[in-house]
Image: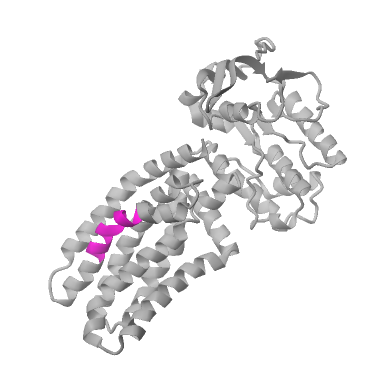
Amino acid sequence: MTAYISTISSQSSLALEARALGCVRGDKTLFSGLNFLITAGDCLHVRGENGVGKTTLLRILTGLSQPESGAVLWNQQALNSQSSAYHRDLLFLGHRDALKEELTALENLQMYAAIDDVQLLLEDAMAALRRFGLRGRENLPIHCLSAGQKRRVLMARMLTRQARLWILDEPFNALDAKAVVELEGLIAEHLSAGGLLVLTSHQAVNIANVKVLEL
Amino acid sequence: MSALLAMIRRDLLLVMRRKSEVLTALFFFVVVTSLFPLGIGADTALLRKIAPGVIWVAALLSTLLGLQRMFAADYADGALEQIALSPQPMVLLVAGKMIAHWMVCGLPLVILAPIIGIQFDLDTSSLYILMGTLLLGTPVLSLLGSIGAALTLGVRGGSILMSLLVLPLYIPVLIFGAGAVYANSVGLGTSGHFSLLGALLILALAFVPWVTAAAVKIAIE
């Protein structure tokens, strides 16, 4: 239940740390005494059976849920003391896509850029959508897209969000083989640019030097 | 400030794409207020007397119809989590949703009120007073209603529970809103009613966005 991962890299201050995290749902203790530390360029793969608390752990890491015990630290500071700064660095994609069905793919990207306070030029948004195979579908409402195409819109959002820490819940769901490769490429880019990643996945992930946390 | 505008623009765009939901609430207001003159008949004295109450009650109920939509769709598809994870202040984002709700469900009532008032044989000064009270009162309805909408997120049968929570809070607005029109019709001053409605609006603006933001955070935890 415990994993000690990585050492503090001195050249970068970006670090996500969990200290003695514990979570209780009802009578059941999902996990306790969970420690890990990831720094710039690290990828943490959270694994475990269904219902073991993977999604709960990710929600605690985002600050959406509170842990029963322990604390999550971003750059050595507790989340609660710096939620705005942390949210600026954070992109969380849960198992629901959070895309508005009535809006087009492009409008969804622009809408989230405005809410996330990110500068997004029209050309960049279009380029992001085209990179992930949505050429010609930029102006279709989301409800006309397939499940896999919706995930591709999310990949375009990951590209345009400019976040340092990605927390992704089952990002490989509903993707075809080509899209899986594209997403792995996107993740590799993110990590090599000094980003951090926490993800859950039931598939084996093809990402260089990934750290595994078994729940 | 950009957060507020971004949220208003987003919600208005969503409404434009799904007009039927909004038009239902407006149609409800028009139809209910039109049924009274039809049912009561051409007793103009009686119609004039009941007009403020009927129009205000219809306004309360049609606001309630739109309230369910304020957070429920965003809650269901996960967008509310994304909003909560925005680096911008949650209070401003939530306030944006309230303003958008008022622009869609409150402002049209203010504009429709004179037309509805004519059916009740209201004179010009009463119509102005009615519009004035609605202009001050409907934002309070949207603000107070947002608390109920946020508290009942994810609750089964939430819309009925929300009505029970919110309608009692609407009573002061109803009393002073309808009271102003009545006071004017019997020749009394209305400045007191307007002052109290204004005070309610200021009070609601000062507290409700924080309360609703906290309620939303609890709902998505």
Quarter of the image for residue B185 reads bottom left
- Say which residue appears at 61% left-offset and 44% top-offset: A113
The structure's colour scheme is one colour
Q: Is residue B12 above or below residue A11?
A: below
Circle count = 0
Q: Is residue A56 left or right of residue B220?
A: right
User: Residue B112 or A53: which is nearer the viewer?
Assistant: A53
Name which residue lies at 80% across and 56% down: A136
State which region is magenta.
Answer: B166-177
Residue A145: where, in percent of width, then height? 75, 54
Tell whether B137 sits left or right of A10. left
Direction from residue B7 to residue B180 in the image, left or right: left
Left-right relation of B129 to B147: left
Looking at the picture, how far across and down is residue B189, in whole percent?
14, 69
Residue B175 belongs to the span the image colors magenta: yes
Q: Quadrant of residue A154?
A: top right
At a point 34% along the width and 77% down the height, the residue shown is B114
Position of residue A191 relative to residue A179, above or below, is above
Percent from the top left, x then y, of residue A25? 54, 27
Q: Is residue A97 visible?
A: yes
